[in-house]
Amino acid sequence: MNLLAHPELLELLAASHALGTLRGGARRRFETLAREQAPVRAAALVWQGRLAGMTELQQPVAPDPAVWTRIRNLIDAEQAQQALERQRDNAAPIASASTGSWLRSLALWRGAAAAGALVAVLAVGVGLNLREQLINAPAVQYVAVLSDDKAAASMLVTFDPKKKQLVLQRVGSFREGTDKSLQLWALPPGGAPRSLGVLDNAPALRLAASESDVRVPALAISLEPKGGVPSAGGPTGPVLFHGPLIEKTL
């Protein structure tokens, strides 16, 4: 199934992946698509960011020892299922394409349905109106996952047209030195790079921007002297991360 042609299903699957309800083969296929397709990877990271904040509202609770036993049992069961799938694949390499496609779609839909159910449980269990939270969450019109030359994601960039700001979240382990700054650049087609701002070392950062600033095919981040460099001269240091800027349907 082409998830990019089904944006609502993509959002449900990304939510299910972030919640942990997308399991087994469906989860592995989704993660494979996320590695290969930037829009899928961006959707997964956006949902991880949305749900991560919920944990900050809960008081820490020490889990019962039985919880760890159940987790161990689930891991063992999934590993056993993977081994069975590998054996079945080796024993019967030729399968019906239509049946396989139907089963894959069924697994994805089951994962999406589980995501919706768990969202409802979370809303009750933590005493939050999750639906209202998501409605009031920042609108995302443009999204980019900026990666290094080895395709390792380092920065998630989203644009909120309502607040006219770029939101940057570090998703990698890179940290610049105290004498250096990261600088974000818009890469217009056929034009010189244009600075969108200098980043501090916070895990999340907001930069003022207009839609015309981000209407470009790609973004990049360079390593510059402390405080950044003038936009007119373009990057002077190495470009560490880059990636396409994708327009999402609101």
Image (spheres, rainbow, N blue to C red):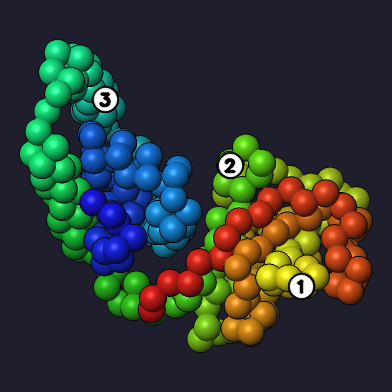
Q: Residue, x 18% and y 20% (percent of image)?
A: 93
Report the residue marked by disc 3. 75
Q: Residue 153, percent across and down?
A: 57, 46
Three-letter code, disc 3 = Ile
Report the residue marked by disc 2.
Answer: 151
Residue 102 in sight here: yes
- Check contact, mark 3 vs mark 1: CB within 8 A: no
Q: Position of residue 77 (x, y in %)?
A: 19, 22
Q: Mark 2 to mark 3: distance in Å?
A: 28 Å
CB of mark 2 within 8 Å of CB of mark 3?
no
Q: Amino acid at mark 2?
A: Ala
Q: Dot 3: what SS?
A: helix
* Number of the label disc, if any, that sits on residue 191: 1
Q: Which quadrant of the structure image shows residue 76?
A: top left
Task: Name which residue lies at 74% across and 48% down.
Answer: 240
**Disc 3 and disc 1: Cα gap in Å?**
51 Å
Tell me the quarter of the picture where residue 210 sits.
bottom right
Residues 82 and 173: in front is 82
**Residue 69 shows in this picture:** no
Q: Secondary structure at mark 1?
A: loop
